[in-house]
Image (cartoon, rainbow, N blue to C red):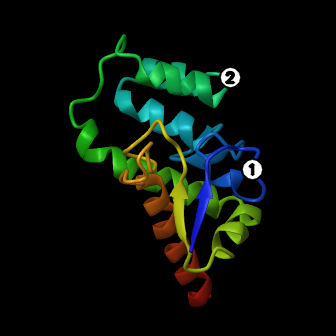
């Protein structure tokens, strides 16, 4: 069985979205959402661009700014983007026990970002997309479970 998620208002799985309002601290910086962090890191180490995206009032605005090529994309982006997403998602769930519980309660179910627009992070319009966000959430779930069992 699979659990489909997408929008932030979906109960209880809206917290799986990168747009969910779950701020977290990473490298001593507070990020409004994982979307803000992910989009800003496209321009590392240019802190002018990073801080401009970090200051965006909404994750949608951060996403649009990060997708714009008005700023120069870092040369290694394709190689590092998955690990950047992993880092952000893990910290978001570590710092919010209420959503970590929701993630852990999904057990061994497949988690699928149900978007027709994205064949990389989600399942895409054909349902055959890479679903990388779902995969990262399942990896995060395994890490959190292992951390709980170790305590």
Q: Residue at x 60, y 26 (%)?
A: 60
Q: Is residue 75 above or below residue 91?
A: above
Please tell me in which quadrant of the rendered image residue 36 appears: top right
Give the image location of residue 58, x and y in percent: 66, 26
Is 16 situated left or right of 118 in this image?
right
Q: Is residue 55 above or below residue 88?
A: above
Give the image location of residue 133, x and y in percent: 47, 53
Q: Residue at x 53, y 18 (%)?
A: 52
Which label sits in the foreground, 2 or 1? 1
Q: Residue at x 60, y 58 (%)?
A: 4
Nearer the N terminus, badge 2 or badge 1?
A: 1
Mark 2, residues whose alpha carbon is within 10 Å: few (<14), some, or many (≥20)?
few
Q: Is residue 45 above or below residue 121?
A: above
Residue linked to disc 1: 10
Element marked by disc 1 = loop
Please tell me in which quadrant of the rendered image residue 136 appears: bottom left
Residue located farthest toward the top when viewing the structure as drawn: 70
Label annotation for residue 110: none
Element marked by disc 2 = loop
* Quadrant, the C terminus: bottom right
Residue linked to disc 2: 57
Is 120 situated left or right of 4 in this image?
left
Give the image location of residue 14, x and y in percent: 70, 51
Give the image location of residue 41, x and y in percent: 41, 35
- How far apart marks 2 and 1 lie (CA) works out to 21 Å
């Amino acid at each position: 069985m699979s659990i489909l998620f997408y929008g932030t208002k979906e109960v209880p799985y809206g917290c799986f979205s990168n747009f969910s309002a779950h701020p977290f601290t990473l490298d001593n910086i507070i990020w409004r959402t994982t979307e803000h962090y992910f989009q800003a890191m496209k321009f590392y180490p240019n802190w002018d661009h990073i801080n401009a995206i970090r200051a965006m009032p909404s994750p949608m605005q951060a996403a649009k700014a990060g997708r714009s090529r008005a700023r120069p994309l870092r040369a290694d982006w394709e190689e590092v983007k998955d690990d950047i997403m992993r880092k952000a998602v893990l910290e978001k769930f570590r710092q919010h026990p209420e959503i970590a519980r929701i993630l852990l309660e999904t057990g061994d179910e497949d988690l699928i970002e149900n978007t027709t627009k994205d064949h990389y992070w989600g399942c895409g319009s054909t349902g055959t997309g890479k679903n990388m966000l779902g995969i990262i959430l399942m990896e995060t779930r395994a890490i959190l479970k292992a951390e709980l069992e170790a305590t």
